[in-house]
């Protein structure tokens, strides 16, 4: 892990209420460049709410999300202008949806999908955009001859890999992933995880990954947060949390995995 | 434009207000027009009215024309460049009846020109108004169906998506295959859909002396280009914007600089090209220009290919 002392992202005392109901409450953590944080917990435990609030998609009821931007230093993501926030979201950040269809434009080719972010930041050279798209397709192990095919002709696993390529093309520093392996069969999952682990390492990405699959969390994340009922009940190094769970719920979660 | 007549149309004695719409509606449309002129390329919502013709027949353009026309105006209406097609004839008659205005087929004589697809070949002057009938005013609609999202994209100048469409064109066809409704950047700020005009006419919009008004009846949007506004067609550095060109000349007037329509003559592959702008073509013929398929010319010219 990188020994960098300035956190890339700092979440302080984040609470999200849906009326009287709690989405998540009093969540605080730091994320450093190149660090992978896993958020695990059962359905309804507030994982996705937390992810949406951190990734500037849903303003929290209370609390602060600060991001270390490349140009302006540390900024509160809900205080900057919407234009700046959206620029941040499509350049320095990336969001990988569980369902690839939510993250892709299904009616344009794979190349256009990958090139979209480049064009959004002002790239106006077709040849260069296409070359970058082809290059990224290779990196996510999709044959380059599929560049002009529609994503709807791709398999589920390929769509997910295309979504990852599309997100990483602008070299973001922070990637949010919401169940990236959900809905994929086990062998495809394994391949995707392998790919993700390689990319995270090579590009020194900071990642926040939400999953209910402890195997995914163990394979990818350096640190782990366990959530229940909207609150973080345990956090620490992944191996530490999974091998020596302290909280009763974490123990239940760990013991519910099939052992071989 | 200069007139705000409130009385009934006395000339025809019909029970219509001048130019069909009531004065309050015309004021509402004029307010939208003023805003549109003040923010070139910005789509201003307006309370579009039901017109006595179906959507898609130019209800937006008709409302704009009704709001700006005065009794001293001379109206020309074209559809696909032609003055004598159903749509053009019916709209011309509509205003002749409800406003009692003079109509013309000559571009130079008109003070207001309502058009469906074309900009006349003859350069327009600063005392003329060009009114476009627009079906879908939103250039981003092809890739982003949500109105809330496209409005935000306009507000924040997020126009990368427009190039995704052009990219897709090149990857599928090897060149930018969009030939009409080709997106333009207005005054370096708003991306605008120039209505279904062929891209051949895009360069004419740039720095045009005439006022250009766009009305979309079904979508209830008005936008405008004030005179002498910068209008640039979007493109890529390595795939620059270019307009259509033809190897052939106009069969009637032998023009090589105008937009040509292809006309199929029979089922044996014979065809001819002819100017889409009928007034331009007629004027050239009157001036003595002759194309190979003109009826003055000896038969058997170059009809067969």
Image (cartoon, coloured by chain):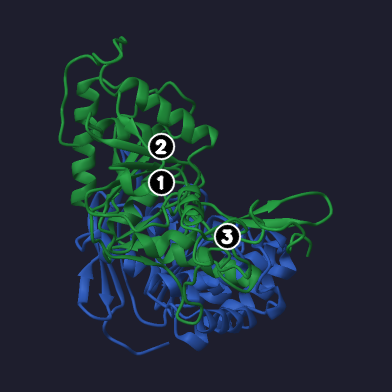
Q: Chain under label 1?
A: B
- Chain in blue colour: A
For label 3, count other residues whose C-alpha is less than 10 Å away and answer few (under 14), some (14-19) or many (20+): many
Q: Chain under label 2?
A: B
Residue B70 visible: yes
Q: Secondary structure at mark 1?
A: loop
Disc 2 from disc 3: Cα separation: 43 Å
Residue A73 placed where, x, y %? 21, 78
Mark toward the start of the polypeptide (1 vs 3): 1
Residue A177 placed where, x, y %? 49, 65
Q: Residue at x 54, y 75 (%)?
A: A220
Residue A144 placed where, x, y %? 68, 80
Q: Secondary structure at mark 2?
A: loop
Q: Secondary structure at mark 3?
A: loop
Residue B233 placed where, x, y %? 40, 66
Compare residues B145 and B71 and report the one nearer the observer. B71
Left or right: residue A179 compared with residue A83: right
* Direction right: furthest residue: B268
Compare residues B55 and A124 and report the one nearer the observer. B55
Count every numbered label the image shows and give the total. 3
Numbered circle sitting on residue B4: none
Query: Does residue B270 sit above or below A70 in this rendering?
Result: above
For label 2, count other residues whose C-alpha is less than 10 Å away and answer few (under 14), some (14-19) or many (20+): some
Mark toward the start of the polypeptide (1 vs 2): 1
Residues at marks 1 and 2 on the same chain: yes
Q: Residue at x 23, y 61 (%)?
A: B228
Q: Which residue position is annotated with label 2?
A: B219
Q: Which residue position is annotated with label 1?
A: B137
| Quadrant of the drawing holding the C terminus of chain B | bottom right
* Chain B: colour as depicted: green
Q: Which residue position is annotated with label 3?
A: B290
């Amino acid at each position: 892990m990188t020994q960098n002392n300035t956190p890339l992202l700092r979440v302080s005392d984040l609470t999200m209420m849906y009326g009287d109901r709690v989405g998540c409450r009093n969540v605080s953590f730091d994320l450093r460049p190149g660090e992978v944080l896993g958020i695990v917990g059962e359905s309804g435990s507030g994982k996705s709410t937390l992810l949406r609030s951190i990734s500037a998609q849903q303003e929290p009821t209370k609390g602060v999300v600060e991001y270390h931007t490349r140009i302006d230093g540390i900024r509160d993501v809900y205080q900057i202008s919407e234009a700046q926030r959206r620029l941040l979201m499509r350049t320095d950040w990336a969001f990988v949806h569980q369902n690839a269809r939510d993250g892709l434009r299904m009616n344009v080719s794979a190349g256009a999908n990958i090139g979209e972010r480049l064009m959004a930041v002002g790239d106006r050279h077709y040849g260069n955009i296409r070359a970058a798209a082809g290059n990224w397709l290779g990196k996510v192990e999709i044959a380059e001859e599929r560049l002009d095919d529609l994503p709807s002709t791709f398999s589920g696993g390929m769509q997910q890999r295309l979504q990852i390529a599309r997100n990483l093309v602008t070299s973001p520093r922070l990637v949010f992933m919401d169940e990236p392996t959900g809905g994929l069969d086990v062998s495809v999952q394994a391949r995707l995880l392998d790919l993700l682990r390689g990319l995270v390492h090579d590009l020194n990405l900071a990642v926040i990954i939400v999953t209910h699959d402890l195997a995914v969390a163990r394979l990818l994340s350096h640190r782990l947060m366990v959530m229940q009922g909207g609150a973080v009940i345990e956090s620490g190094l992944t191996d530490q949390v999974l091998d020596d769970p302290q909280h009763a719920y974490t123990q239940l979660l760990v013991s519910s995995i099939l052992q071989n | 434009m200069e007139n705000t007549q409130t009385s009934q149309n006395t000339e025809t004695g019909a029970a219509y207000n001048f130019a069909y719409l009531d004065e309050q509606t015309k004021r509402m449309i004029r307010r939208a027009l003023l805003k549109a002129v003040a923010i070139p390329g910005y789509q201003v919502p307006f309370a579009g009215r039901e017109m006595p013709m179906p959507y898609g027949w130019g209800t937006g353009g008709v409302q704009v024309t009704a709001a700006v026309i005065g009794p001293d105006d001379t109206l020309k209406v074209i559809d696909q460049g032609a003055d004598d097609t159903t749509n053009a004839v019916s709209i011309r008659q509509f205003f002749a009846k409800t406003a009692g205005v003079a109509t013309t087929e000559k571009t130079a004589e008109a003070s207001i020109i309502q058009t469906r697809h074309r900009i006349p070949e003859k350069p327009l002057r600063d005392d003329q108004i060009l009114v476009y009938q627009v079906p879908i005013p939103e250039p981003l609609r092809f890739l982003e169906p949500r109105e809330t999202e496209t409005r935000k994209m306009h507000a924040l100048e997020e126009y990368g998506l427009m190039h995704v469409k052009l990219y897709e064109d090149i990857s599928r066809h090897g060149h930018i295959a969009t030939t009409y409704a080709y997106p333009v950047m207005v005054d370096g700020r708003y991306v605008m859909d120039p209505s279904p005009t062929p891209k051949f006419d895009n360069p004419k919009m740039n720095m045009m002396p005439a006022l250009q008004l766009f009305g979309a009846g079904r979508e209830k949007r008005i936008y405008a280009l004030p005179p002498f506004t910068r209008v640039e067609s979007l493109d890529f550095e390595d795939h620059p914007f270019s307009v259509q060109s033809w190897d052939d000349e106009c069969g009637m007037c032998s023009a090589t600089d105008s937009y040509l329509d292809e006309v199929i003559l029979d089922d044996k592959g014979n065809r001819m090209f002819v100017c889409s702008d009928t007034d331009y073509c007629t004027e050239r013929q009157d001036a003595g220009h002759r194309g190979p398929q003109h009826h003055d010319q000896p038969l058997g010219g170059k009809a067969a290919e």
